[in-house]
Image: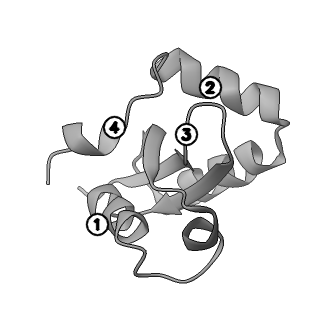
Amino acid sequence: MRSFYVYILTNRQYGTLYVGMTGNLARRTWEHKSKSVPGFTKTHGLDRLVCYEIFDDVESAAHREKQIKRWNRAWKIQLIEKMNPDWTDLYFGLNR
């Protein structure tokens, strides 16, 4: 069964936040880390995976991504701190 992920990246604790969605979290995070894809995350140096949620279908993941993107910054920070209070880079704990 395939999984889909909604994730949040940052450059540092309480730094700039980016919300994205992918079908392969390890690969996509690596793309952000290696700066191989031009765009917002490369420009702002966002490569620290601080939060993610797993979904069984792409529709649910896309809905959640849009929901979180509409949230204010404080709500996003609460979501991060619920899962990852120390804002550690979760990429290194992913099964790759």
Q: Nearer the viewer, mark 1 or mark 3?
A: 3
State the image coordinates of residue 96 (x, y, percent, origin top left).
14, 54
Q: Mark 3 falls on what kind of element?
A: loop
| Distance in Å between CA atoms under marks 3 and 2 | 16 Å
Name the amino acid type tagged 1: Arg
Query: Along the polypeptide, which appears first: circle 3 or circle 2?
Result: 3
Q: Residues within 10 Å of mark 1 (few under 14, many from 20)?
A: few
> Which is more toward the observer, 90 or 61?
90
Q: Mark 4 falls on what kind of element?
A: helix
Query: Along the polypeptide, which appears first: circle 3 or circle 4?
Result: 3
Q: Which residue is mark 4?
A: 90
Location of residue 27 with respect to 57 vertically, above or below: below
Disc number placed over residue 79 in the picture, else none: 2
Query: Along the polypeptide, which appears first: circle 2 or circle 4?
Result: 2
State the image coordinates of residue 21 (x, y, percent, origin top left).
52, 60
Q: Residues within 10 Å of mark 3 (few under 14, many from 20)?
A: some
Q: Nearer the viewer, mark 3 or mark 4?
A: 3
Query: Along the polypeptide, which appears first: circle 1 or circle 2?
Result: 1
Q: Which residue is mark 1?
A: 27
Quarter where residue 88 is shown:
top left
Q: Seen in the image, is 91 located left or right of residue 47?
A: left
User: Pointers 1 and 3 in contact (CB under 8 A)?
Assistant: no
Q: Mark 2 falls on what kind of element?
A: helix
Name the amino acid type tagged 2: Leu
Q: Which residue is mark 3?
A: 12
